[in-house]
Amino acid sequence: MKNEIIITVKDLKGKHHILHCPTDMGFTLKDMCVAYELPMEAVCGGMAMCATCHCYILNDIIGIPQKNDAETALLSEVMTTTANSRLACQIPLTNEMNGLYIEIASE
Amino acid sequence: MIETDILIIGAGPAGLFTVFEAGLLKMRCHIIDALPQIGGQLSELYPKKPIFDIPGFPSVLAGGLIDNLYEQIKQFKPGFTLNEYAINLTKIEENLFEVTTNKGTVHRAKAIVIAGGLGSFEPKKPLIDEISSFEEKGVNYFVKNPEDYTGKNVVIAGGGDSALDWAIHLSEITSSLTLIHRRNEFRGALDSVEKVRLLKQKGKINLITPAEVTQLHGNETLEAVSVEHEGETKTIKTDYFIPLFGLVPRLGPIANWGLEIERNAVKVDNSTDYSTNIPGIYAVGDINTYPHKMKLILCGFHEAAMACQSIYQRLNPNKKFVLKYTTVSGIDGFDGTRKEAEKQVVASID
């Protein structure tokens, strides 16, 4: 479908969820995880202030924006950060991200 | 003991506005909050960020909205128990509840409104296996009494404002102060970073970056920490380790009050009055849940108004609830003030 992508999310229990995500509404990856009621707290609402939308990018997908300073700094303080860590609230969804596969990080 | 009509748990926007709606109905309120200041997330997480969806405010800073809400409610003289969180709730009799805080402050109220937002904020703990055995025995997640650290060796970890601020402050009184951060860059205010740099030059702060505390050592109490720095591990003798990695919200003790909980939120009846499964206890704002719940401040305001009229009817079963418009009826504060619209002068034309 035009302006809709599919994202696969692995939750903390290892269960996979298929998310159908519109790309023309200005939603972020965090917005869709919350909309699908996945176990992502996203406390601060998307301001890169709390790191409760921490996730791991599991496949190579083009179009994911680079981390900005705020995201880099915040992730550096999270104990479970790895090289593929991102804050879902800082990833606006675009058509190029179709097929993205992520895992929700534990705290 | 603190006695009031409505005890509000949480001093965020929904909790604060509950005071206003209750005040219009002549009910007095007292608010408990775990944080030392009012405003909840808005003051703690994003006071300088704008909000664009408060009706009537094209843009308002979160901190400014809290200032305005306080200005709006202060005539109703709310009481505050700040820096304490509610632990126990007991129903004494019909329309009388008792709530005790972690510091033992006892509150009695005829009704309870839980406006706890995301819950109480608790410290993020570093992933160090033995850390729980050293809690309160050298490991502290908050600096409660700075004077406790006078003449002691202290290690602080973290890269945000609280780590920087406490490092600056405590370095004046400690025997030694080490600040450890996983990166070379700090996330706090620029002037704090500059102060730390100067204190490092003066030898008042031992700054180790990029580094991480990986192990704690000691028998009964903390004696040393292991620090991993550029591939090497070294041991630093210390009396205290203070990890300051920010706060995360938890529903906390509210979860044990017998309330119906769903997905970390308190289930309420949204078709009527935002009451919980316990008569006399209501939940408003981000802490409640119901079908199609939207976690928006403006929804919290509506919920507060509905809960207050229900409490009024509950406490005054023989009085008829009459909806008042503030423009028409004015507002009588509990402090003796009165606000009212200017009376229209009717002039006749001869």
Image (cartoon, rainbow, N blue to C red):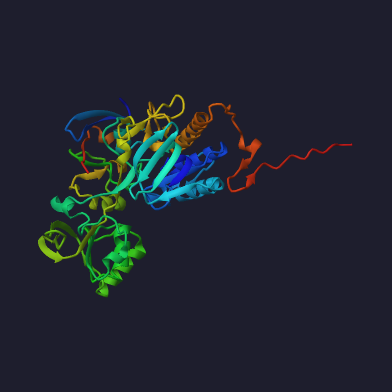
Please, is residue B350 above or below residue B65 in the view? above
Specify the farthest residue to the right: B350
Q: Which picture quadrant has residue B249?
A: top left
**Left or right: where does residue B302 sit relative to residue B203?**
right
Q: Give the x, y percent position of residue B147.
A: 31, 66
Q: Tally the numbered discs.
A: 0
The N terminus of chain A is located in which quarter?
Answer: top left
Residue at image location 26% in from the left, 72% down from the top? B204
Q: Which picture quadrant has residue A87?
A: top left
**Left or right: where does residue A79 sit relative to residue B260?**
left
Residue at image location 49% in from the left, 29% down from the top? B314
Residue at image location 84% in from the left, 37% down from the top? B348
Q: Give the x, y percent position of residue B81.
A: 42, 49
The C terminus of chain A is located in which quarter?
Answer: top left
In the image shown, does A36 or B153 lie closer to the viewer? B153
Q: Give the x, y percent position of residue A82.
A: 17, 47
Q: Give the x, y percent position of residue A51.
A: 28, 46
In the image shown, does B188 or B327 lie closer to the viewer? B327
Please, is residue B136 above or below residue B288 in the view? below
